[in-house]
Structure formats: C-alpha cells, structure tokens
C-alpha cells in the first residue's frame, strides 16, 4: 500500500492573491483532488472506445485505472498544466 500511495498526482485550483500577486491554492474547491494508482478515469475524445484501449478490465475502451510514474508535463498556451504518462 505504501508503494502505491507514492504514485499519482494532485489537481489543485490556484488563484492569484491580489495584495501580493502570489499564487495560492483555493481551499475546498470542488475540482481539487488526488489522483492515484487506483483512480478511475473516463476516456473521452477521439480515442474513446478505440480497440487500442480495450482491455479485459474494460471491453468498451472508455475507462482506465490509475496513474503511475508521471514524468511528462507542461503548460498549455492558455495557462493550465497538462500531464501525461
């Protein structure tokens, strides 16, 4: 369990503090969450349902489990952060 807990990432909404200009987390925002090695994700977009995503755990190709060993990421042109495996 400890090894599994070491994997994953967090989604945290931040906003600029007007007085200092520094970014900080927005407490209790409904989008804030932890994504782990066992989190379920719904596949959307053109890849959803692809034969390449169909597994014995999900024969529809529309659901995947977990996020592991994240090492790729960057900032999008509109200022959000995107991570991938």
Image (cartoon, helix red, strand yellow):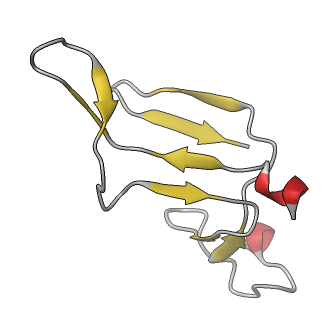
Residue 22, position in %: x, y?
27, 16
Q: Is residue 67 above or below residue 69?
A: below
- Depth order, front residue of 40/63: 40
Q: How many badges with numbers are in the image?
A: 0
Q: For residue 71, what is the image quadrant? A: top right
Residue 63, position in %: x, y?
65, 76
Residue 37, position in %: x, y?
76, 61
Q: Which residue corresponds to the image point at 31% horizontal and 62% vertical from the top-left?
A: 30
Q: Locate residue 68 relative to residue 83 in the image: left or right.
A: right
Q: Is residue 11 above or below residue 41?
A: above
- Quadrant where the N terminus is found in the figure: bottom right
- Depth order, front residue of 37/3: 3
Q: Which residue corresponds to the image point at 70% horizontal and 71% vertical from the top-left?
A: 64
Residue 54, position in %: x, y?
78, 77
Q: Is residue 83 visible?
A: yes
Q: Which residue corresponds to the image point at 86% horizontal and 57% vertical from the top-left?
A: 2
Q: Locate residue 41 relative to residue 44 in the image: left or right.
A: right
- Quadrant where the C terminus is found in the figure: top right
Q: For residue 29, what is the image quadrant? A: bottom left
Q: Which residue corresponds to the image point at 61% horizontal and 58% vertical from the top-left?
A: 35
Q: Is residue 15 above or below residue 19?
A: below
Q: Locate residue 47 relative to residue 20 in the image: left or right.
A: right
- Depth order, front residue of 32/1: 1
Q: Is residue 78 visible?
A: no
Farthest residue to the top: give it. Answer: 20
């Amino acid at each position: 369990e400890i090894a599994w807990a070491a994997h994953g990432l967090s989604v945290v909404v931040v906003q600029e503090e007007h007085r200092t200009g520094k970014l900080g987390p927005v407490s209790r925002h409904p989008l804030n969450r932890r994504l782990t090695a066992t989190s379920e994700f719904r596949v959307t977009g053109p890849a959803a349902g692809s034969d390449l995503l169909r597994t014995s755990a999900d024969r529809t190709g529309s659901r995947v489990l977990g996020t592991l060993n994240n090492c790729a990421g960057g900032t999008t042109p509109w200022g959000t952060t995107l991570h991938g495996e």
